[in-house]
Amino acid sequence: MTYSSSDLTHSYIDGRWTPVTGTQCSPVINPATETPVAMLHHAGPADVEAAVAAAKRAHLAEALGSKDNRVALLERIRAGFDSRREDLAQAISLEMGAPIDLSRNAQAETFLIQLDATLDALRGFAFAETLPNGDHLIRQPTGVAGLITPWNWPIHQISLKVFAALAAGCPVILKPSEHTPLNARIFAEILDAAGLPPGAFNLINGDGASVGAQLTDHPDVAVMSFTGSTRAGLEIGASAVRRGARCALEMGGKSPCLVFEDADLDQAMEKILAKTFPNSGQNCNAPTRILIEASAYPAAKEAAQRAAALWTLGDPAQSGDHLGPVANGRQFDHIQTLLHGAIAAGATVLCGGAGRPDGMETGYFVKPTILADVARKAEVVRQEIFGPVIVLQPFEDLDDAIAMANDSEFGLAGYVYSNDPAIQSAVIRQLDCGMVFVNGADLAPGSPFGGTKKSGIGREGGTYGIEEFLELKLVAHPA
C-alpha cells in the first residue's frame, strides 16, 4: 500500500486487518482542491467491541512484557520508519494540506522525534522505587488505553500517545481524526511490520459522535487520552469521571505573547509569526494574542507588517516554504466568520483579511492575517482561531499585561519578549499556563506539553507522557 491508497475499509484489530462492519462512510478531502482522494469506512459498534476485547486480552496476558521487551519493541518500530517516511509525508500533505516540504521536514519527522524521546525516557524510567520511609512504590500499566487524535499534526499526536502507552505497557485502541486517516493507516502498517503482540495496538476509524463516544464510554477502557477541541475534551473528561477512569486531555489554546518595549521588535515579530503561521496557523500553542507595551505599539505594528510580507500561499504539492490551505471547509468557515466579525467591529487589518486570496477560488486557503486595535473582549480575541491569524493589542504596564494575558478560559502556553530578567521572571511566575517560552525559545523533545484551565489535564512527552498511562501502587511491609 502507498500513501494514496483508498483502502480504508478495514480496521486493525488483534494483529489483523479486519473488514469494518459499519455502514457509514465519509470522503477524505484534499483541502487544496476540495476533491475526495479516498473514502473512509467507519467502524461499527461490533468493531469497537472487538478492538477493546483484543486490547483487554493483551493487557491481562501482559503481552507487552518487561521494560526490556518494550524497549526492543520500540526499537523495531524505529527500524521500520525509514521505508515509509515519504509515504507519511505525502499522505499528510494530501489529506490535511501541509506543504510537502513542511510535511517531510516537520510533520512526518515527528514520528521519529517522539519515538526517540519515548525510548530515551523508557530506558531510564524507574517502574519501582523505595521511599525514604521504607515503603515501596510500583508503577503498573493502567490497562486498556483509548486514544483519540486530531488532524492538525496527525502523526505527531499519534506518536506522542501510542509510544508512551506502549512504553508503559498499556495496549491501545487508536481512533484518529476522520479527516486524516491515511497517515494513521501507514502508522499501523509500520507497527504491524514490527511484530507487535496481537491486541497491543488496534486502529479503528470513524467520527467522534459514534465511534469516539463508544470508545470513551466503554467500561473496559481504563484510560482515555484525547487531543482536540475543548468541547469534545470536556465531554470525554466527564465520561471518564462518571465511570472512574483516568483521562488526559489536551484541548484548545489562545496563547498570549507579551512584547515589552526593550525587545528587538523586528526580530520578535519574525519569531512570533514563525511560530504562528506555519502549518497554516493550525498549532494549538501558537502565540495568537500579541500584547505589546503601549510605548512600542505603533512601531510593533509596522514590524509586524514587515514580517508578514515574507509569508505567501501556494500549492502544498509544490516544494517551497509557502503556506498551504487550512485542513477542511468547516475550519475555513469558522475562520472567515471570526474575521468578518472582527473587521465589522472596527479592527484594523494590517495584512490579509477576510475572503479567499486572489487567484485561489478553489481550496481552503486563508490569507495570512494580522489584526490590530481589537477590543479586549472581541470574539477574535477570546476564541481559538486555528488559522494564520494573529491580533495585536496594547498594554499599559506589567500588571496590565499579566491581567490581559490571564483573561482567558485557556492556559496552554505563554510567550514573553524582553531582555530584562526581572520582567521575564515576573511573567514566568504569574502567567496561568502550562508552558512559558522566553524570547523565541522552542520546546525540546521529551519536555512536558500541556496546559491549565480549559486547555487540558495532564502532560504529554517523554517521562511525563509515560506516567499518564501508569498507576502508582504503594507496598508497605512490616517494620
Image (cartoon, grey):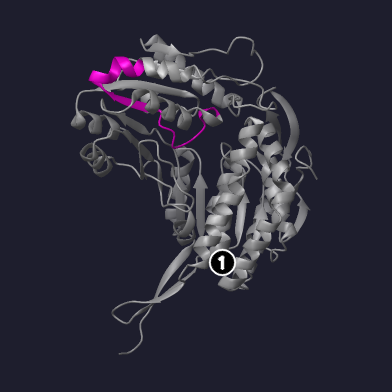
Q: Is residue 115 left or right of residue 140?
A: right
- Residue at x-position 53% and y-position 52%: 217
Task: Give the residue at the far bottom of this rendering.
Answer: 479
Front residue of this view, candidates 14 and 260: 260
Figure check: 358 above or below 172: above
Residue 338 in magenta stretch: no
Part of the protein shown in magenta? 280-301
Residue 40: percent from left, percent from top: 72, 38
Report crowding for label 1: few under 14, some 14 to 19, many 20 or more residues within 10 A (C-alpha). many
Quadrant for residue 87, please give it: top right
Q: Which residue is mark 1?
A: 169
- Residue at x-position 63% and y-position 59%: 52
Residue 290 in magenta stretch: yes
Secondary structure at badge 1 equals loop
Residue 33: percent from left, percent from top: 70, 22
Identify residue type, mark 1. Gly
- Residue at x-position 20% and y-position 39%: 422
Q: Is residue 184 left or right of residue 392?
A: right
Is residue 338 visible from the viewing direction of this image? no
Q: Is residue 189 left or right of residue 475?
A: right
Figure check: 317 above or below 197: above
Front residue of this view, candidates 131 and 230: 131
Residue 304: percent from left, percent from top: 40, 19
Q: Can you say which quadrant of the picture contains the N terminus? A: top right
